Image (tube, rainbow, N blue to C red):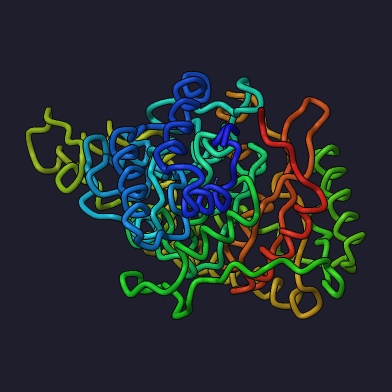
């Protein structure tokens, strides 16, 4: 095959490796050639694991030569957000406090990728502890948007989104607590899937807000998202919130969308929505209609409380989850301390960045006695109302279509001085985390400046396979150009 192997989808790589048309080693080498060429500008990776990847790839090729069956992602180059544990490799969460922490075990999602013969090319950059929407909160480096290096890739999984867009790998895993897969996917012109809560085990994912966090894939095709989910999904006894269900299968897409009912939430098409985003999303909806779907307006009336309630629930859970980083158990310790108290104080003081500290303080305050009912309990009630909005909507429609983000990718520094402006990036993605349903961002066009725009499709809990099948019909009718 004389083709550039980095242009192939994961499904195509796995198929070609299984048939012996290409070697896993050649696919890995093509990925590293591209990484060596473009990574100095993109800066998607916190660690590139070239030697281990080439060894893994050769082992896949040996397995094939020995006539052993190969897994569903045979030889597919995969990147991992650096809040997922890959045994033997540093996991930093892009935080100084975890510098030097070597993972002692594989996350379940990672172990399943390994068992499916995927090849790990590296660990990707993120906003520290997955808190942010631009990857600018990384303690180590800025990742640039491969479509325009003066702009952010989105966040918090900005490194994973950029890596797939730049064709450093066919698949990258991210985590999505309030939009961190879908928002960067929209910004980088790739597919990003947040599965139904409980579909992918969180075992080995460094917890941010446990009731919202979900692992999911970035890919360049919807088929690859479905394929990856079929590998990493399914029940895991190591995660008590893992659903007792098998992984969603890769369902063959129907030939059209006849009979599919799509809802447009009125509250998402509001002032503040960038006109170019709106135009692209409406054009995508017309395309869905022309494929046979029926479209009607629906209402998700509690959307206006999404940001406010998320910024109580998520920091509360974060303040509790991040208490474990005390200078004793993991990674970095500030050695200038002269008492135990100072070990905690100095390590956390110099180890955590400003945004993480802001969340810990917010969460600790909201959970303190006297405030718990006023803030945390109330936010949880609002969360229930948001989930009910979706239940009502899904009694009338099969899918919801809406923008993924209010704006196209923004410039570095544009929102760093105003945390609330940054938080607003997730106004359309947070509701799915609060309700625990499945949603996906799929590219739907380019702005006048050539920046990617995304449309978000949402389905009810455990509607993952149905959502992916419909998205495949859309994608086939409206292919999106990969970055050259
Ligand atoms: N941007 C949101 C936040 O900062 C969402 C992050 C995420 O999904 N991990 O909390």
For residue 147, above or below residue 185: above
Q: Position of residue 202 (x, y in %)?
A: 39, 62
Q: Position of residue 359 (x, y in %)?
A: 43, 46
Give whichever of 331, 76 is nearer the camera.
76
Query: Residue 97 occupies which quadrant of the picture?
Result: top left
Query: Residue 26 occupies which quadrant of the picture?
Result: top left
For residue 3, above or below residue 312: above
Name the side, left or right, on which 272 lies relative to 4: right
Kindly give the residue lying farthest to the left in the view shown: 338
Q: Quadrant of the C terminus?
A: top right
Give whichever of 382, 139 is nearer the camera.
139
Q: Quadrant of the N terminus?
A: top right
Q: Position of residue 416 (x, y in %)?
A: 56, 29
Viewer can see residue 253: yes
Query: Residue 134 occupies which quadrant of the picture?
Result: top right
- The tally of labels here is 0
Viewer can see residue 367: no
Q: Position of residue 443 (x, y in %)?
A: 72, 45
For residue 58, above or below residue 19: above
Give whichever of 478, 455 is nearer the camera.
478
Which residue is rendered at x = 85% and y = 38% of the image?
275
Which residue is rendered at x = 64% and y = 72% of the image?
463
Which residue is rendered at x = 62% and y = 20% of the image?
150
């Amino acid at each position: 095959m004389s083709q550039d192997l980095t242009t192939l989808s994961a499904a195509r790589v796995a198929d070609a490796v299984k048939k012996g048309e290409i070697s896993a080693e050649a696919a890995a080498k093509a990925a590293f050639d591209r990484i060596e060429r473009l990574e100095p500008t993109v800066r998607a990776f916190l660690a590139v694991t070239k030697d281990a990847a080439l060894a893994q790839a050769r082992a896949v090729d040996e397995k094939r030569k020995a006539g052993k069956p190969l897994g569903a992602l045979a030889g597919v180059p995969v990147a991992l957000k650096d809040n997922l544990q890959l045994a033997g490799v540093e996991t930093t969460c892009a935080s100084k406090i975890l510098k030097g922490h070597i993972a002692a075990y594989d996350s379940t999602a990672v172990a399943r990728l390994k068992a499916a013969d995927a090849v790990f090319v590296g660990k990707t950059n993120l906003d520290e502890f997955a808190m942010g929407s631009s990857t600018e909160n990384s303690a180590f480096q800025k990742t640039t948007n491969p479509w325009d290096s003066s702009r952010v890739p989105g966040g918090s999984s900005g490194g994973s989104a950029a890596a797939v867009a730049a064709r450093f790998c066919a698949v990258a895993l991210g985590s999505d607590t309030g939009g961190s897969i879908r928002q960067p996917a929209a910004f980088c012109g790739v597919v990003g899937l947040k599965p139904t809560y409980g579909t992918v085990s969180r075992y080995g994912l460094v917890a941010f807000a446990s009731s919202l966090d979900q692992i999911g894939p970035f890919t360049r095709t919807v088929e690859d998202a479905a394929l990856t989910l079929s590998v990493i999904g399914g029940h895991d006894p190591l995660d008590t919130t893992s659903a007792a269900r098998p992984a969603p299968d890769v369902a063959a897409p129907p030939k059209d969308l006849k009979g599919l009912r799509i809802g447009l939430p009125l509250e998402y098409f509001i002032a503040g929505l960038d006109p170019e985003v709106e135009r692209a999303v409406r054009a995508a909806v017309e395309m869905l209609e022309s494929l046979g779907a029926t479209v009607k307006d629906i209402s998700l009336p509690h959307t206006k409380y999404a940001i406010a309630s998320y910024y109580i629930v998520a920091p509360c859970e974060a303040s509790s989850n991040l208490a474990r980083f005390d200078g004793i158990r993991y990674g970095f310790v500030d050695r200038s301390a002269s008492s135990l108290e100072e070990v905690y104080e100095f390590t956390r003081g110099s180890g955590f960045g400003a945004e993480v500290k802001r969340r810990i303080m917010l969460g600790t305050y909201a959970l303190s006695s006297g405030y718990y009912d006023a803030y945390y309990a109330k936010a949880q009630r609002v969360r229930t109302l948001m989930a009910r909005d979706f239940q009502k909507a899904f009694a009338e429609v099969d899918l919801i279509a809406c923008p993924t983000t209010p704006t196209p990718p923004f410039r570095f520094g544009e929102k760093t001085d105003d945390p609330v402006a940054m938080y607003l990036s997730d106004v359309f993605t947070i509701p799915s985390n609060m309700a625990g349903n499945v949603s996906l961002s799929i590219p739907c066009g380019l702005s006048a400046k050539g920046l990617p725009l995304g449309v978000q499709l949402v389905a009810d809990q455990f509607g993952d396979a149905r959502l992916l099948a419909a998205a495949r019909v859309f994608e086939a009718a409206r292919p999106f150009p990969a970055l050259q």
